[in-house]
Each structure stands twice: as structure tokens, then as C-alpha cells.
Image (cartoon, rainbow, N blue to C red):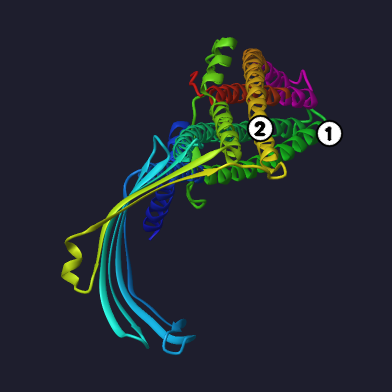
Amino acid sequence: MRYALLALLLFVCTSNIKAQNVLSLEESISLALRQSYSIQEAEYSLTSSRKNLEAAKLGLMSSVRFEFDVPRYSLQLSSQFNPSTGSEEFFKTGNTTVEGRLLISQPLLFSNGTISLIGSLFGRDQYSDFAGTNRDYFSNLSIRLNQPLFVFNSQKASLEKAEINLDRAERNYSKAERGIIYNVTASFLRLYQSKKRMEITRERVKQNEESFETASNKFKAGLIAEVEAMQLEVDLASSRNELLDAERNFEKLKNEFKLLIGIDLGENIDVTAELKFNPIDVNLEEAINTAIANQPDLQNAKDEIRLSEISVEEVDAQSTFRADLSANYGINKNDDRFKDVFSNFLDNRSVVMTLSIPVWDWGKNRTEVQAAEAGYKSSKLNFRNLKESIRNEIISSVNRINTAISRVDVLSKSVEVAEKSYNISLERFKSGTITSFDLSQIQLRLVEAKQSSLNALIDYELAIAELERKTMRDYH
């Protein structure tokens, strides 16, 4: 029975170990780029813009539509002159019509016009108190051109807007990818930092346990005063409490990290990394030029200038001289017999040129143009300001990297010194040449040196990640 329980316990422990998913930074980024909320939102936005452009292009192709009236019915009293009585009288009139229409339309992108082919066929029953019921048929086929002249080309502008919006969506998707990579990197490094702090604190607890055990033995032997042993006991209790706080913080950051990369909160994960200090040399001007060339926000701001320019042209065109040409040519036939409406056609033709000259609108359009021009100037101002902001951000990022390099180099050496000092002091405490208070202070300096060195290395990695996000370029 005992062996069965041991086997079951071993199986449970092994299962727990296998269930834990140990993630590296690269694996975490890969997960986030596949299933995180942010990347899914960016994908939907990109898909929407692609479909809008596709719809705009398809809208410039021929469209075909059928319409049917099955039936169109009316019955009413109509006032008509009755020659037999010499007066107007009301008579009941009505009709029932069954009609089908075919409409084929083709927008003309180069001219902003539309050419259409229209066909119709109907049969009609007419009835009145005068003539009883009469049936006839009608067929019609015509080609029609509607062409605005001297006006803003709205079709071409709509297509250009859709293309610009797609370009912006693609840049925003790339920006979202870079943002996810940075956020995952930052969250991963904070989680890893928390884990290492927990390990440093756990090591401190172990050191305090050994020091307290040594002090207790020395107190029992009468070699030190009780207050020294009590001091180390207080240090041990304090370090254990710090360990509990570190463990809680690690679990909290772990759950936040799970949400970020899109995995279930119930999944058991851990992180692993080999952070090696490899200082990089960043050319400031090159980094600034790269950021200006690659920054999606700056490119989007440039597109916003063009969209504002189109808006000014569109608003201004509303008050300009306009001409609309409408031309129609067709053939048709009306007959009492259905088969005869498809032969011996008559033709019909028409041309209408409509001129529109704005005269007075109380300054409404002028005010609208001024508003659009203000938006255009604002877009240009935003572009210039954003460009300078990017320059300033890159300078700050490069300075942060250089500062972090100096800190990592200095603090890594301080850890080596602090470890040697602690080992020497521990032996001196055992030999009775220093007090427990001296040992406690030296141990505290060791912990601070390790945490400061870790913080400097994390800051260095975060600074590089931030520069990569802003320049859209890899530096590792």
C-alpha cells in the first residue's frame, strides 16, 4: 500500500511538472502575435480597410440590376370634360401594369460620368367608364450618358481615399505588431525581473537561516550576547516576509502576462531567459533618420495632409460654375399585340445641357472652405510637430541606452565585490571578529547590489526594445 501511494504521489508531481509551460521571450512574442487581443483587433481593422478598397474598386465596374413591378395598380376618380354634357365630370379610371426593367450602369472614372443601358418591357390593362378595358404593350431600349463638367471628380477622390486608408491600415498593423512585441518584451522582462528578485530574496532567506543557526550555536556556547542572536532572528523574519511579498508580486505579474499574450489564466507558466550584456553602438543621426522614414504615425500624418487637401478641393467645388450634360438615345414601340412590340421600332433621342451658376449663399460655402483650409493647415502643423517629437524621442532613447550601458558595467562589478565582501565577513563572523549587525549590513549591501545590477540590465534591454519600436528596426 505504501508503494502504491508513493507511485501515485510521484505520478501527480510528474504531471504537474509536465503541465507547466516554460516560455522564452521569443515564444511569448510568437504566441502574442497569433492570439492576443491587440493583434486580432489590428487584423480586423486591416481586413476592414482592404474590403473597403475592394468595394471602392468594384464600385467602378459595371453594375447590373433587374427591377420588376408585379403588379403596379391604381384606381382613382379623374376629372374629364364630357362633350355630351359640356362640363367637367368625374369618372373612374385605373390601370394594372406588369413591368420589368434592366439597368446596366458603368461609372467613368476618368471623367466622373456614368453611362447606362436601360431596357424595359411592360403590359398594361387600362379601364375607364368611357372606354371599358384596353390592353397594350410597350418595349424600350436606350443608352444614356450623364456627364458633369467643370466639377470636382468625386469618383477619383473616393478611390484615392480608399487607397490612402488601406495604406494607413497596413502601417497601423505594422505599428500594432511592433507595439505588441514591445509590450510583450517589457512585460516578460518585468516578470523575469520579479522572478530573479524572488530568487535573490530566497537566497537571502537561506543565508539568514545559516547566519541565525551559527549565531544560535555561538549564543548557546556563550560566545556572543543574546541581542546579536536576536538581531539575526529579526533579519530572518524580515527576509521571509519579503519573500512572501516577492512571490505574490510574481504571481500577479504572471497573470497580467497571460492576459497580454492571450493564454488562459488557469495555465501554469514560467519564464526563462539568458540575459547577456552585449552593448550596442547606436548612431544617433542614423536612428533619427530611420525613425522618420519608418514611423507609421508620421506617414499617416502625411496622408492626413493629402486627405485634408482633398477635402478643401471638394468643399470649394460646391460653389463653382457647373455644367451637366445628359444625352439619351433609344428605340421603343407600343402596340396592342405583344409580339409586335419587338419590330419596327421608333427611335427617340434627347440632349440636355444644364448650367448651374452659384450667385449668393450668404457666405456659407466660403466659411466651409475656410474651415477645411484650417483643417489642412492643422494637418501640416501636426506633421511638423510630430517629426520634431520623434527626433526628441530618439535622442532620449539613445541617451537612455548609453546611460544603461554605463550602469550595467559599473553595477556588475559591484556585485562581484559585494559577494567577496560577504563571504569574507561571514567567515569573520564565524570567527568572532565582527558582530551580527556588521554581517547584516554587509548582506544587505549584497542584496542591493544584485538587485541594482539586475535592474540596470532590465533597463538596458527595455531601452533597446523601445528604440526598436520607435525606429521599426532590430538592433539585437
Q: Which residue is mark 1?
A: 227
Q: How many marks?
A: 2
Region of the chain picked out in magenta, as a range: 420-444
Please name whichever residue, 111 or 198, is drawn nearer the observer in this view of the structure. Answer: 111
Say which mark, if any, is on residue 373.
Answer: 2
Q: Percent from the top left, x then y, of residue 138?
A: 26, 67
Please name whichever residue, 401 or 316, is drawn nearer the observer in this view of the structure. Answer: 316
Residue occupying image coordinates x 52% and y 19%: 293
Please name whichever residue, 168 or 138, is drawn nearer the observer in this view of the structure. Answer: 138
Dot 1: what SS? helix
Residue occupying image coordinates x 25% and y 71%: 137
Say which mark, if any, is on residue 70.
Answer: none
Q: Quadrant of residue 245?
A: top right
Dot 2: what SS? helix
Residue occupying image coordinates x 57% and y 24%: 470
Q: Earlier in the sequence, mark 1 or mark 2?
A: 1
Instruction: Report the side of 305 relative to 126 (left or right).
Output: right
